[in-house]
Image (cartoon, rainbow, N blue to C red):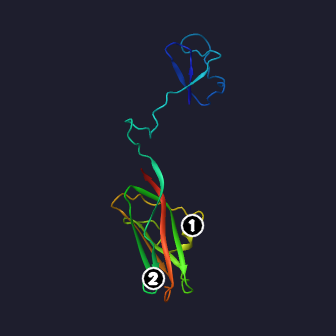
């Protein structure tokens, strides 16, 4: 947005125009003499700018910024003795709002073929999943596309809980390891 300079010593501004640098449309210029008259050859000058919102108010003090960061939980594994459900709990140290869940899955052995499903995804008491039905774990693989999830914000003291189930637990020494990662934004 720019203001047209009238050339007066007191820098009197006429008002904002829509197209900076474009010639004024017909009817916008007032002809004649006097203080409010625009004259040919008048150049636009930039409007005074406000201080950027992330500029430090005090020199030398770090300014908070929004960062894209991953958070994760310790990996767990489905084994012959683990049962068919794993619960992952993440406690954030800073305010965090996630937008992408990735399940990193490693299968070891011939009996580790069960279907993984996300049955619960909670931020505090808020369920991120819009329905009570489980979602297949493949939807949250690292190569899945279009799987952004807008999570409610989590502040320190609010846990993020993810429950993953498997349709058939592995047998003997076989295992299915799962490591969840949530990408999102925090203030740093």
Closest to the camera, between mark 2 and mark 1, is 1
171 or 47, which is in the foreground? 171
178 or 126, which is in the foreground? 178
Relative vertical location of residue 156 with respect to residue 167 in this rendering, above or below:
above
Q: Residue at x 45, y 82 (%)?
A: 84
Residue that extends furthest to the top in the rendered view of this protein: 33
Q: Which residue is mark 1?
A: 142
Quadrant in which the N terminus appears: top right
Which element type, helix, strand or loop, lies under badge 1?
loop
125 or 167, which is in the foreground? 167
Which numbered circle lies on residue 129? none
Q: Which residue is mark 2?
A: 84
Answer few, some or many: residues within 10 Å of disc 2's Cα (few below 14, many 20 plus, some between 14 and 19): some
Please provide percent x and percent y for residue 147. 56, 64
Answer few, some or many: residues within 10 Å of disc 1's Cα (few below 14, many 20 plus, some between 14 and 19): some
Answer with mark 2 or mark 1, whichever residue precedes in sequence.
2
Residue that extends furthest to the left in the rendered view of this protein: 157
Cβ–Cβ below 8 Å for labels 2 and 1? Answer: no
Residue 133 visible in the shown view? no
Q: Residue at x 46, y 87 (%)?
A: 80
Which element type, helix, strand or loop, lies under badge 2?
loop
Gap between marks 2 and 1, in whole Å? 23 Å
Relative vertical location of residue 143 with respect to residue 82 in this rendering, above or below:
above
Relative vertical location of residue 44 with respect to residue 33 in this rendering, above or below:
below
Please provide percent x and percent y for residue 78. 47, 81
């Amino acid at each position: 947005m720019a203001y047209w300079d009238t050339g007066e010593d007191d820098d009197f501004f006429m008002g904002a125009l829509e197209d900076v640098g474009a010639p004024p449309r017909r009817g916008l210029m007032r002809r004649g003499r006097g203080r409010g008259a625009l004259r040919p050859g008048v150049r636009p000058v930039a409007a005074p700018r406000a201080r950027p919102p992330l500029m430090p108010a005090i020199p030398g003090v770090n300014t908070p910024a929004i960062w894209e960061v991953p958070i994760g939980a310790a990996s767990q594994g489905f084994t012959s003795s683990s049962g068919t459900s794993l619960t992952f709990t993440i406690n954030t140290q800073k305010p965090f709002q996630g937008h992408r869940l990735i399940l990193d899955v490693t299968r070891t052995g011939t009996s580790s073929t069960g279907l993984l499903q996300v049955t619960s995804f909670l931020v505090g008491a808020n369920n991120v999943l819009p329905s009570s039905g489980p979602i297949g774990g493949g939807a949250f693989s690292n190569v899945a596309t279009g799987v952004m999830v807008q999570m409610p914000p989590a502040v320190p003291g609010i846990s993020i809980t993810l429950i993953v189930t498997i349709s058939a637990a592995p047998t003997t020494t076989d295992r299915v390891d799962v490591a969840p990662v949530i990408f999102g934004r925090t203030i740093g």
